[in-house]
Image (cartoon, rainbow, N blue to C red):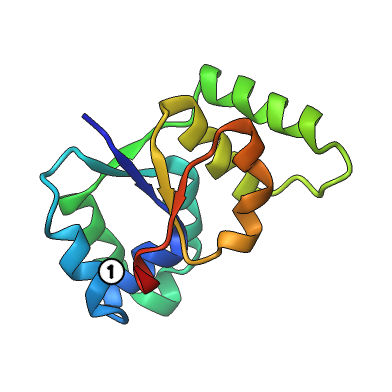
């Protein structure tokens, strides 16, 4: 059962081992308990030249990539209704995805996601846990 969804920055930290506490925290969970959104996967694919294809492919060995589908689209619409003047972006899609799966979103960009907490989004920052 999925418990956590990792934001793009946490994936990069995990790959590069920038924050040992992230690797340590990650090691406490079994395969299938942590995932990434297909939106996060798309963001990581944009950085393949920077990070290397092999590095991003390593994530596929340890994390499930969950597709963004119908329910996630509905959650995205609700977030858009909640904050119509806020620029719609990939972070909103990732927040909607975590909300639709009812999982905790792990990010180092708490400020970007805190606006979605009134909708029920639960956040953690493993970089400074």
Between 94 and 54, which is closer to the camera in this rendering?
94
Tell how many labels: 1
Say above or below: 16 vs 115. Answer: below
Viewer-proximal residue among 37 and 42: 37
- In the rendering, at what x and y percent does residue 95 appear? 56, 41
Q: Residue at x 34, y 68 (%)?
A: 129
| Quarter of the image that includes the N terminus | top left
**In the current view of this chain or complex, which residue is farthest to the right?**
85
Disc 1 target residue: 14
Image quarter of residue 28: bottom left
Q: Residue at x 53, y 18 (%)?
A: 71
Q: Nearer the viewer, residue 52 or 85?
A: 85
- Residue 20 is left or right of residue 70, and the answer is left
Q: Is residue 16 above or below residue 69?
A: below
User: In the displayed structure, would residue 20 be above or below residue 119?
Assistant: below
In-front residue for pair 24/74? 24
Q: Residue at x 56, y 33 (%)?
A: 120
Q: Is residue 1 left or right of residue 74?
A: left
- How many neighbours does mark 1 have within 10 angstroms: few (below 14), some (14-19), or many (20 or more)? many
Q: Position of residue 64 (x, y in %)?
A: 25, 41
């Amino acid at each position: 059962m999925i418990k956590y969804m990792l934001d793009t920055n946490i994936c990069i930290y995990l790959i590069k081992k920038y924050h040992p506490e992230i690797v340590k925290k990650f090691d406490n969970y079994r395969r299938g308990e942590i995932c990434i959104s297909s939106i996060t996967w798309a963001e990581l694919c944009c950085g393949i030249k920077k990070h290397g294809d092999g590095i991003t492919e390593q994530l596929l060995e340890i994390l499930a990539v969950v597709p963004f589908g119908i329910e996630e689209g509905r959650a995205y619409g609700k977030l858009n209704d909640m904050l119509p003047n806020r620029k719609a972006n990939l972070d909103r899609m990732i927040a909607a995805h975590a909300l639709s799966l009812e999982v905790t979103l792990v990010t180092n960009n708490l400020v970007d996601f805190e606006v979605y907490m009134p909708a029920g989004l639960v956040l953690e920052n493993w970089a400074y846990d």
